[in-house]
């Protein structure tokens, strides 16, 4: 197994109601998880689930009420471990009066990078995030996508082993989201571990190796994409032309026939029924263009879990 860079055991955080208030409410309630090296780990949950609280505890910015947390083999409260961590906060605010290159130099100095390495690191990160041509412009002139990419560059300037990304594609247009996804995957291929907190389920489904779904301070489910988005038993058929007598043609095969533009969807019990369906269509002269087993999307799985729990808090 890959070495775990993050370990949390029975993690709890209780926010009290004022200085002399009552019990308050648990933002996190007994959370345990591990994140392996060289992976992209996704954290999902509705608003108020405890996601940002968890990230801040991992970064040593919020004190936990109970439990144990190790980051890179050290206590999360050990300041020295932060030199090995990168962080892109949600809705970050970079100094708009600086150029992108000036901002990276500032953060490199704050991160303790050696002076002899700073110039090379700046150019390396600008190249990685595709911001070299805009590096001489002020940050106040950047689009939302450009600000996210230069923000990602600052999180990487000291070449961390572990990077936390809090809503990295929020408010970014489709082209910018694709660029950020590509950067994340390039970092993963270089062995960097990324912890992604996002409410954009499609983004998470596309790039994460493993996902935790959090709700009401507890983990509802954890698993790989394959485990969280199983096949539904339905199969989508794409046809050159949909026959008018489709229902009678497929009578006795499967169930829950749903005609669709350019084809249909049918619930099948096994591969034998799938073979019978294909044989029936071909015998009738129907041209089949594609056959695709239907899986749950991450969004469908996520919403279903929340409904089973009674909805978000």
Image (tube, rainbow, N blue to C red):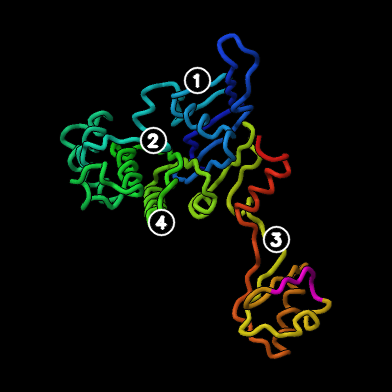
Mark closest to the chain's N terminus, 2 or 1: 1
Q: Which is closer to the viewer, label 4 or label 3?
A: 4
Q: Which is closer to the viewer, label 4 or label 1?
A: 4
Q: Quadrant of the C terminus?
A: top right
Residue 16 horizontal side relative to residue 74, left or right = right
What secondary structure is the stretch in magenta mostly built from? strand
Q: Which numbered disc covers residue 63?
A: 1
Q: CA distance from mark 4 to mark 2?
A: 20 Å
Local secondary structure at mark 2: strand
Q: Which residue carries the number 2 mark? A: 87
Q: Which residue carries the number 3 mark? A: 232
| Mark 1 nearby-residue class (10 Å; few <14, some 14–19, many ≥20) | some
Q: Which residues are magenta?
A: 253-259
| Mark 3 nearby-residue class (10 Å; few <14, some 14–19, many ≥20) | few
Q: CA distance from mark 4 to mark 3?
A: 28 Å
Mark closest to the chain's N terminus, 4 or 1: 1
Residue 254 shown in magenta: yes
Residue 115 horizontal side relative to residue 266, left or right = left
Residue placed most toward the observer, 22 or 118: 22
Local secondary structure at mark 1: loop
């Amino acid at each position: 197994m890959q070495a775990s860079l993050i370990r949390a055991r029975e993690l709890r955080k209780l926010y009290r109601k004022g200085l002399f208030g009552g019990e308050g409410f648990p933002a996190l309630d007994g959370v345990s998880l591990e994140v392996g090296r060289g992976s992209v780990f996704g954290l999902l949950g509705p608003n108020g689930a405890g996601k940002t609280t968890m990230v801040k505890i991992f970064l040593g910015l919020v004190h936990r009420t109970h439990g144990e947390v190790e980051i890179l083999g050290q206590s999360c409260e050990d300041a020295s471990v932060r030199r090995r961590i990168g962080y892109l906060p949600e809705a970050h605010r970079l100094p708009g009066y600086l150029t992108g290159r000036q901002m990276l130099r500032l953060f490199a100095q704050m991160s303790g990078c050696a002076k002899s390495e700073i110039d090379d690191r700046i150019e390396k990160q600008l190249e990685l995030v595709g911001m070299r041509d805009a590096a001489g412009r002020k940050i106040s002139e950047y689009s939302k996508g450009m600000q996210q990419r230069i923000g990602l560059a600052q999180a990487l300037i000291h070449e961390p082993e572990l990077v936390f990304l809090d809503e990295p594609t929020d408010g970014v247009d489709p082209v910018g989201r694709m660029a950020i996804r590509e950067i994340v995957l390039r970092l993963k291929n270089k062995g960097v571990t990324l912890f992604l907190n996002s409410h954009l389920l499609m983004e998470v489904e596309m790039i994460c190796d493993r996902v935790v779904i959090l709700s009401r301070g507890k983990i509802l489910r954890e698993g790989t994409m394959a485990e969280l988005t199983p096949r539904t038993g339905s199969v989508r058929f794409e046809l050159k032309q949909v026959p008018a007598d489709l229902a009678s043609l497929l009578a006795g095969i499967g169930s829950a026939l749903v005609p669709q533009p350019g084809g249909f969807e049918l619930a099948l019990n096994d591969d034998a029924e799938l073979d019978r369906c294909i044989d029936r269509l071909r015998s009738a002269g129907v041209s089949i263009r594609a056959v695709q087993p239907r899986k749950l999307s991450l969004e469908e799985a996520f919403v279903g879990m929340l409904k089973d729990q009674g909805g978000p808090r």
